[in-house]
Amino acid sequence: MSHVFRLSALLLLFTLASCVNVGTPAQRQQRAHELSTALQQLSPTVSAREADRLASTAIEESAKLSADFNPLCYPWLNNGLVNTGLRKRGLCYQWRDDLFPHLFLLHPKTMELHLTASKRDTWMEHHGIIVTAKGQRFEDGLVIDPWRHGGRLWWGRVAADKKHPWKPLPYELTPMVLRPLLMPDLYPTKESAQVAPTKR
């Protein structure tokens, strides 16, 4: 009986995993265009070229993460597998931490990226990225969330995302994996040390 149960469970997991669809290249290109439009609507000061690059990168890198994580249809099921040790990675903060560097290294001049969390220190804690126009209020930004649909990037205005009361992630809680990127003076890498000017 236990063998039959295990087989049924594996078949169920396979079915759930197979329903995640990040779209064809043409569909992802169309979604990148839609995301770029949403980014440009943040402010007239947002560069269309920068918005296009950030949108395309966010869509494509999220799709790549989906291939890496092989998520289930329902994110909470995927979290269960990670939390019970059946999978090594795939929690929401890991999706965010893997996507963020690709966007940060675009060095947008007319937009700013913010690490964000909702309902911290509860079982409903969630993590994402907020994009604002340069100098814009956090509350007026756009949430981008690669975890919510398993790599099919979700986005929406902060105020419209009613299930998640997003707040800026406190500076002291910056993830360790992102500190060399965001705090290079405090967490220098070998590469940054090699290019740093010599003091005399």
Image (cartoon, rainbow, N blue to C red):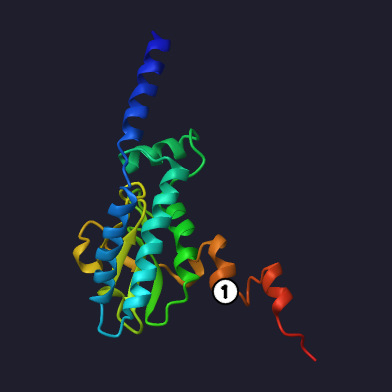
Question: Going 77% across and 85% down the picture, which residue do you hit?
Answer: 198
Furthest residue in direction right, as rendered? 200
Residue 44: x and y in percent read: 25, 84
Residue 70: x and y in percent read: 42, 40
Q: Is residue 101 left or right of residue 142?
A: right
Taking depth in this image into account, of 64 and 130 the one nearest to the observer is 64
Residue 60: x and y in percent read: 40, 56
Taking depth in this image into account, of 122 and 115 the one nearest to the observer is 115
In the rendered image, the quadrant that contains the N terminus is top left
Tell me which amino acid carries mark 1. Answer: Met
* SS type, badge 1: loop
> What residue does disc 1 label?
183
Question: Going 43% across and 56% down the picture, which residue do you hit?
Answer: 61
- Quarter assignment of residue 134: bottom left
In the rendered image, the quadrant that contains the C terminus is bottom right
Residue 13: x and y in percent read: 36, 28
